[in-house]
Amino acid sequence: MTHESTAVGLASAYSNTTTASGDWWRDAVIYQVYVRSFADSDGDGIGDLRGVRSRLPHLARLGVDAVWLTPFYVSPQADGGYDVADYRAVDPLFGDLADAEELVRAAHALGLRVIVDVVPNHTSEQHPWFRAALAGEPGARERYLFRRGRGTDGDLPPNDWESIFGGPAWTRVADGEWYLHLFAPEQPDLDWTHPEVTAEFDSVLRFWLDLGVDGFRIDVAHGMVKAEGLPDIGRGAQATLIGSEPLPFFDQDGVHTIHRAWRRLLDSYEGSRIGVAEAWAPTSERLALYVRPDELHQAFNFRFLNCPWDPAAMRTVIDESLAATTAVGAPTTWVLSNHDVVRHVTRYGGGPQGLARARAAALLMLALPGSAYLYQGEELGLPEVTDLPDTARQDPAFRRGRHQIPTPRPEPDPQAGPEAGPEAGTWAGPEAGGGAGPEAGGGSGTGPEAALHTAPQAHTATRPEAGTGSGTGPEAAAASRPQAALHGTAEPNPTRPEAGNGDGDTPDLPTAPEADGQDGLRDGCRVPLPWAGAEPPYGFGPAGSWLPQPDAWAGLSVAAQTGDPHSTLELYRAALELRRALPGLGAPEAGGPADPCGMRWQSAPDGVLLFTRPGFACTLNTRPDPVELPAPGRPVLSSAPVETDGRTVRLPADSCTWWTP
């Protein structure tokens, strides 16, 4: 008989003990909302908090446990809101504080928890602290990392550090000093050795906890502490080293002191409030340090996101990830896509093959022990939008190197023969320089191979242009800045602080494919969602959308897929319902036996992964052709129809199937 992909009857009640307990986060499925692109309530083409609130029933029906909101704070929007000018206020672009409060209440009424972003590594250049620093207020520069330059006249950067967005990580201000910005020049790094910085962020966390949020996703959780003396690295193309080698500006031991203090703060509130680390570390063991019992609750597992479509590589990443987190009593947190990487439908090859693999990978992820994060639109099977016009792009990395964009390389397909062309695996993801790196926090982030095809650049070659420094404060900046035009045109960030290269020259932007930084393709995963209708904006809002939506998305909308048992949306709904119903899924409780997940790999044909958990089995066929094997039980969910006579099963190519006895 043929088993249809989602035609299953599922229990609806929770049965996983951790979900109902205070340790809800150990097996939670958390849905990332990129606020700007989720739903627009007022017709300006940009998503907002009221739009999110109106669509919360979709998330409740999908079956997720919590929603994570990207930054909605007052910001000049130089980097999608990850340049914060006021951490306690909602940017008028997204609503006001009353909208945030109502959203939290509405989510809680639907049984959804709410996690918000906090951006502690850097502020906006429009933050009052940085404006005071530029104005020469006594002591103000001590909150940031200002240094004198090198060279006879101090006209060289203080060290050889590079910005994740390309070029030096230093910008010179009018009086000759330089300030550090690991990301865009509009995002000056804070000095976390200053007590006022520590006190300020304790206050910010308490502000939002008092409002009712359930936790924080911590942007660049590995970056707040820099090595003493800010030593040179001695080599270029530094973004290629992130997550693979020690660096003096990331994963310093001192960040753990900060996270321990924040854990104590979180624990002082009722309701199991959590901290989630966006952290890159050279090894799984180093990453596990962020989720020790007295530190944060979760840390994103980007090795899984970066893993190629190869069974041996997948098994290695899964084993090493589980071993590292189990050693410290924490769950592993899995993720396939986010707002900083090419959507995994496209990463896995695009077209029917990419969609088949993406559906299978989702079932694999949801069957693994621990927690999982979903990125908005992946439940619809959305592909990356790869043909956005230059006028629509708003990624700051694109603007810094927009004269010529590096060309994505093919991702090798271990199952494809030598004749396989680029269509089999072309993508612009982390290994091709196609984003700031997995889970990077809106541009504040990094990936271990975020600039794989880049070559070193002389640190004196790129300096941002001089700005006017004439802004009047974060609120005024937010209210007066140009709004994004519908369907994509937006003006570049209008002003910069009183910073420049000292001679008034315009910046010498990188123009070659080997230029440092990203290729600016992050906008392709941020295109607003299709909700309903036959043409753009597909119910996103009353008018257009800040990035243009493809004409082909009509068939991928929520309305179009609802009720279709073969749709990706119904597959996700069924998987999340079944994940709750089966006691063998989800996460183990803390303090359990040495192998708490009860997961066992079983023998399987080449190209197939087969593992069991209590009362459950999962098969993943990564081969481009069907494969037969003894049936491990009764199929209850599959990403593609499977044929079984009860004794043997014929697994379709690029598919994943869940089984019960």
Image (cartoon, helix red, strand yellow):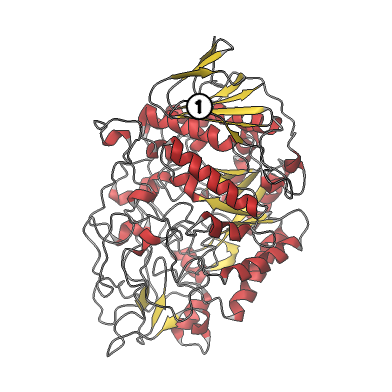
Q: Nearer the viewer, residue 354 or 319?
A: 319
Q: Residue furthest toward the left?
A: 512
Q: Residue at x 61, y 51 (%)?
A: 325
Q: In terms of image quadrants, where is residue 617?
A: top right
Relative image position of residue 369 (x, y in whole percent)? 62, 40
Q: In terms of image quadrants, where is residue 65?
A: top right
Q: Quadrant of the C terminus?
A: top right
Q: Nearer the viewer, residue 440 or 49?
A: 440
Relative image position of residue 595 (x, y in whole percent)? 67, 43
Q: Tell me if residue 563 comes above or below residue 42 in the rendering.
A: above
Query: Which kind of residue does numbered mark 1 sit on?
Result: Ala
Visible residue check, residue 32:
no
Q: Residue at x 39, y 36 (%)?
A: 348
Q: Residue at x 59, y 64 (%)?
A: 89
Q: Residues within 10 Å of mark 1 (few under 14, many from 20)?
A: some
Q: Residue at x 71, y 66 (%)?
A: 265
Q: Tell me if residue 277 comes above or below residue 52 in the rendering.
A: below
Relative image position of residue 536 (x, y in whole percent)? 41, 35
Viewed as shown, does residue 528 lie left or right of 631?
A: left
Q: Nearer the viewer, residue 345 or 644?
A: 644
Q: Which residue is mark 1?
A: 604
